[in-house]
Image (cartoon, coloured by chain):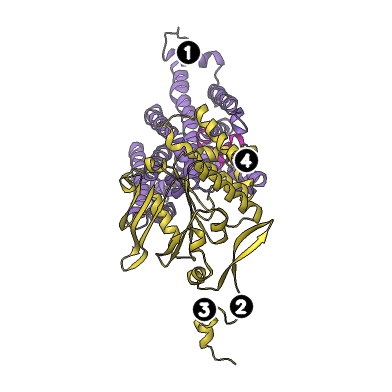
Chain colours: A purple, B yellow
């Protein structure tokens, strides 16, 4: 009588398949790039980092595998996954399919923070820290505005996010106007278009724990987040601590987004489009949605970044490519299932 | 026993929305709350549900003051069926109903077979178990209402609060919902429902409460409270309550009237600006 039905039935198979694709994609990506490597070399170099292996390769190969490609591949999966999971969380909580992770101003804030430091040609770590700081600050501002001046409802929060976003975008425009057109302006512009080219292993020591802890927290609250899709008042009558759930979703999504943005710049559309792909695959229920979104997002960003690494002589901006691909995918989704969106 | 005593509420001081509202509701009873639009019915429900905090008076359930309870505990005593849900995205019916189990879950825990059984039982009780795997947005208005009632049932509360459960429904769905409500009262639920159809007080309810401008006009059994006189006063519109016979039984029916002749004193009810307009 109480058998699993509908979307629930095939969920585990779909999830296992996605994890398998992610793992295969992870290893396959080591062969992409200008420096040619064989399967044996890659496996031996990777193995040598945690177990004794007889060494027959040179230092360049070690650097390419362990420092350059490893960090970039893992970052692609984590950033794509984090943005998609954050997008899925916001879409469910704000009851809106058109929402992306930068709804509350995190990208605008981070963009200004990074550009401001580039104005004085700061070091890379300074740029990252400033982006991180201002990204958080923007969301905090939006949250405070809605709490102090508004009625604490989700609608006011969204409005505050829009206002804060445009405020930091205005500041960013000022910075761009002031920037040196020979040096600072091109690097600001390039940063804003997103790239995984500058990620190193040190960044991973922040990226890995932040995304994993955030995902874990969101997963703990999965059933409460589902009730938010029915609205704040209904969730409260079902016994859900709405302010707590709202806080958890905003905190985790913001942390995942800001850590991605400060390492990779602004990568558009992934966080908005991938949750729709996931929903078409496993339905709306948040626990399934967020886990599947994470892996699809990881695979998508890995594929796009591999395209850049494999085919282009220059580091083409990642954010531009994701936006280019996101639009037709979104139109396809809209044509297929858009009639159900309200 | 749910006891509301001298409830006061206002959004702005000096403009009371609820004034000295008192009533009782026992388990097994169905109380129909009648009143014109904007009279504070929804505010009263929000106070009962803990969505708004009353400015005065008490809401006591079985000797527990509800304002001392946390929202999770309150949800196990009182469940809510909204007039319509703002549910976004294509959740399946069983997932929507499962949401009602959220307060019974340990932090982070998954739903158990027991939860799924409770969900299916609620759907079966309302004769909508065949909808379990359908997508909620694809359902008709009547089916959605049933699913929302099922969601309230799985909360396993003692009292149900329904906000206009029959709004926007056709006759057959209105009767289906009212039958379901009566079934639930027989199962032991205390039910409070609001309605814009005074007939429903006769059809399904054991008691009626007439509310106007934030205060209780009268309350009691439908037969003694829902009269032509009280409804005319309540809605400021002529309403007749009359006896009808069908299928060998006698019924009370409420009829709002367009024209009354002299019997009800039409001059008292016509809009004031219609009287002051000079006839051209």
Element on which disc 1 rests:
loop
Above or below residue B211? Residue B151 is above
Our reading of the magenta stretch's main secondary structure is helix
> What number is the disc on residue A28?
none
> Percent x, y for residue A295?
53, 31
Upstream in the sequence, badge 2 or badge 3?
2
Numbered disc in front, either 4 or 2: 2
**Which chain is disc 4 placed on?**
B
The residue at which mark 2 appears reads as: B259
Element on which disc 4 rests:
loop
Upstream in the sequence, badge 4 or badge 3?
4
Element on which disc 2 rests:
loop
**Which chain is disc 2 placed on?**
B
Q: Residue furthest top?
A: A54
- Distance of label 4 from label 1 (alpha carbons): 71 Å
Q: B259 or A81: nearer the eye?
A: B259
Q: Which residues are magenta?
A: A271-289
Circles 4 and 1 in contact, beta carbons < 8 Å: no
Element on which disc 3 rests:
loop
Q: Residue furthest right?
A: B247
Please check the rendered image and state whether residue B225 is part of the magenta-colored stretch, yes or no: no
The residue at which mark 1 appears reads as: A57
> What number is the disc on residue B269?
3
User: Do marks 4 and 1 share a chain?
Assistant: no
Numbered disc in front, either 1 or 2: 2
């Amino acid at each position: 009588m109480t058998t699993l039905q509908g979307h629930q039935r095939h969920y585990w198979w779909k999830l296992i398949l996605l994890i398998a694709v992610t793992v295969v994609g992870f290893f396959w990506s080591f062969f992409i790039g200008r420096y040619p490597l064989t399967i044996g070399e890659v496996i031996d170099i990777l193995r040598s980092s945690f177990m004794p292996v007889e060494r027959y390769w040179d230092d360049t190969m070690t650097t390419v595998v362990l420092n350059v490609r490893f960090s970039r591949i893992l970052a692609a999966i984590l950033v794509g996954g984090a943005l998609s999971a954050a997008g899925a969380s916001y879409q469910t909580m704000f009851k809106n399919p058109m929402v992306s992770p930068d709804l509350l101003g995190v990208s605008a804030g981070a963009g200004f923070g990074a550009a401001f430091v580039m104005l004085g040609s700061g070091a890379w770590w300074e740029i990252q820290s400033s982006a991180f700081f201002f990204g958080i600050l923007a969301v905090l501002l939006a949250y405070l505005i809605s709490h102090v001046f508004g009625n604490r409802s989700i609608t006011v929060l969204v409005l505050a996010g829009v206002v804060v976003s445009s405020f930091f975008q205005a500041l960013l425009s000022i910075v761009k106007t002031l920037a040196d057109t020979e040096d600072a302006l091109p690097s600001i512009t390039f940063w804003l278009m997103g790239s995984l080219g500058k990620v190193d292993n040190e960044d991973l020591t922040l990226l890995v724990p932040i995304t994993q802890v955030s995902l874990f927290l969101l997963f703990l609250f999965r059933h409460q987040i589902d009730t938010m899709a029915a609205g704040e008042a209904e969730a409260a009558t079902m016994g859900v601590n709405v302010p707590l759930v709202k806080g958890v979703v905003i905190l985790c999504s913001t942390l995942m987004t800001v850590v991605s943005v400060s390492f990779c710049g602004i990568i558009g559309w992934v966080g908005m489009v991938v949750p729709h792909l996931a929903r078409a695959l496993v339905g709306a229920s948040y626990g399934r949605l967020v886990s599947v979104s994470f892996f699809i997002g990881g695979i998508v960003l890995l594929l796009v970044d591999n395209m850049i690494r494999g085919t282009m002589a220059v580091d083409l901006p990642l954010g531009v490519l994701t936006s280019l691909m996101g639009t037709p995918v979104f139109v396809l989704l809209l044509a297929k299932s858009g009639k159900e969106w309200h | 026993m749910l006891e509301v005593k001298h409830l006061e509420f206002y959004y702005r001081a000096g403009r009371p929305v609820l004034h000295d509202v008192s009533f009782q509701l026992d388990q097994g009873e169905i109380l129909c709350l009648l009143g014109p639009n904007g009279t504070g019915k929804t505010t009263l429900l929000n106070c009962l549900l803990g969505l708004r905090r009353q400015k005065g008076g008490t809401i006591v359930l079985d000797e527990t003051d509800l304002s001392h309870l946390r929202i999770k505990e309150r949800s196990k005593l009182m469940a809510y069926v909204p007039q319509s849900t703002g549910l976004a995205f294509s959740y399946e019916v069983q997932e929507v109903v499962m949401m009602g189990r959220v307060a019974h879950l340990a932090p982070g825990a998954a739903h158990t077979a027991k939860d799924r059984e409770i969900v299916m039982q609620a759907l079966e009780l309302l004769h909508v178990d065949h909808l379990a795997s359908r997508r909620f947005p694809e359902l008709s208005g009547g089916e959605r209402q049933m699913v929302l009632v099922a969601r309230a049932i799985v909360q396993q509360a003692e009292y149900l609060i329904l906000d206009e459960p029959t709004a926007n429904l056709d006759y057959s769905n209105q009767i289906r919902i009212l039958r379901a409500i009566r079934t639930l009262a027989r199962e032991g639920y205390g039910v409070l429902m609001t309605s814009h159809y005074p007939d429903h007080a006769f059809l399904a309810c054991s008691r009626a409460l007439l509310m106007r401008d934030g205060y209780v006009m009268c309350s009691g059994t439908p037969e003694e409270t829902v009269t032509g006189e009280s409804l005319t006063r309540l809605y400021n519109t002529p309403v007749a309550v009359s006896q009808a016979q069908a299928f060998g039984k006698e019924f009370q029916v409420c009829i709002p009237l367009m024209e009354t002749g002299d019997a009800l004193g039409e001059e008292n009810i016509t809009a004031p600006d219609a009287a002051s307009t000079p006839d051209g």
